[in-house]
Image (cartoon, rainbow, N blue to C red):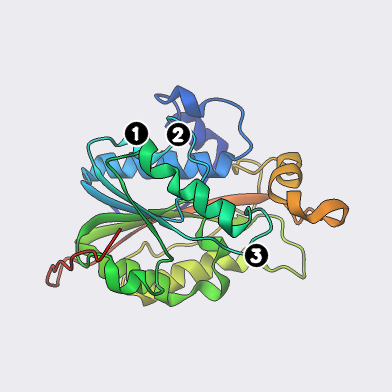
Amino acid sequence: MQTVIEFATVDQWWQLAKHRPAYRQFTQTPLKDFGYLRILQDLQQLGARRVLEFGCGLWIAPDKNLFDLLPDCELWGVDDWQDLHYFPRESEWAKQYDALRPRFPKAKFLRGLIGQPPLLGTLPKGYFDAVVSVSVLEEIPDFHRSVFAHAFELLRPGGWLLGTFDFCATPLPAYPWQNWPHASVDAQRAAGFELHDDCKPPKCVDHLLLENPVGVMLYYESGEGEDRKYWGHFGSMYTAARKPVAGTETFSPVIGQ
């Protein structure tokens, strides 16, 4: 499989969803849907057996998540409460996150953030075939290189970092989101990943897969009351980056779950 940098289009979403009826329905989160569809395509092509998803979240819809759709894989989910306006209170978040365990008894769910303690010392190194995330990287300020460095450490040689990064396709001058995809690509390369050379967002948004503006105002901006603002049309960039084969594979046992 080749490394990839690509920008989600409506046509691509339609083709990816061809054999997955649950995804061919109206949704408030089309970019999330695209991310999972695209990751599933690559995971199946790679024959990945050990997969970690960071930022797996609480809203895991039936038949639209890795834990349902990859029952034969060893799946790990890691996430933690963040002080974001669309998050519930921390106590409620923790309660809902714990409720995922009985839903997916074969999966391992840990609480924490990639690139930060305690996960830096507890996740198995050189162990995973793929580390993935969907619509998470844009929430990380300044593209903390510790996230990509940790993901690199967790992957076996030849393993893959797969994920989507949501960006503003029609940015306002005060919010230069158009530069964020480039920063994410640069940070992945700086961590040691092999990645395609080209990162050129389309000049025209006509074919891009975009979030529904009304859905964004009602769903993502729900905590901002009457002062909420719509910041522009968001699209998504998908990257498939590879850890070089050279190196020694190691394993560190998990301490507690």
Q: Nearer the viewer, residue 167 or 131?
A: 131
Q: Earlier in the sequence, mark 1 or mark 3?
A: 1
Residue 111 % position (x, y): 41, 60
Q: Earlier in the sequence, mark 3 or mark 2?
A: 2
| In this picture, residue 251 sits left or right of residue 159 | left
Could you say which quadrant of the image residue 147 lies in? bottom left
- For badge 2, the amino acid type reads Lys
Camera-side mark, 1 or 3? 1
The residue that mark 2 highlights is 64
x, y percent for residue 193: 32, 68
Three-letter amino acid code at the position of disc 3:
Trp
Q: Which mark is residue 69?
A: 1
The quadrant in which residue 117 appears is: bottom left
- The total of numbered circles placed on residues is 3
3 vs 2, front mark? 2
Residue at image coords 65%, 51% = 234
Amino acid residing under circle 1: Leu
Q: Is residue 7 visible?
A: no
Q: CA separation, marks 1 and 3?
A: 32 Å
- 195 over 132 or under it: above or below: below
Which residue lies at the image location 30% right of the left edge and 58% below the top edge? Answer: 257
Residue 29, percent from left and from top: 59, 40
Crowding near pointer 1: few (<14 within 10 Å), some, many (20+)? few
* Disc sitting over residue 177 in the figure: 3
Which residue occupies the foreground of this view, 203 or 117? 117
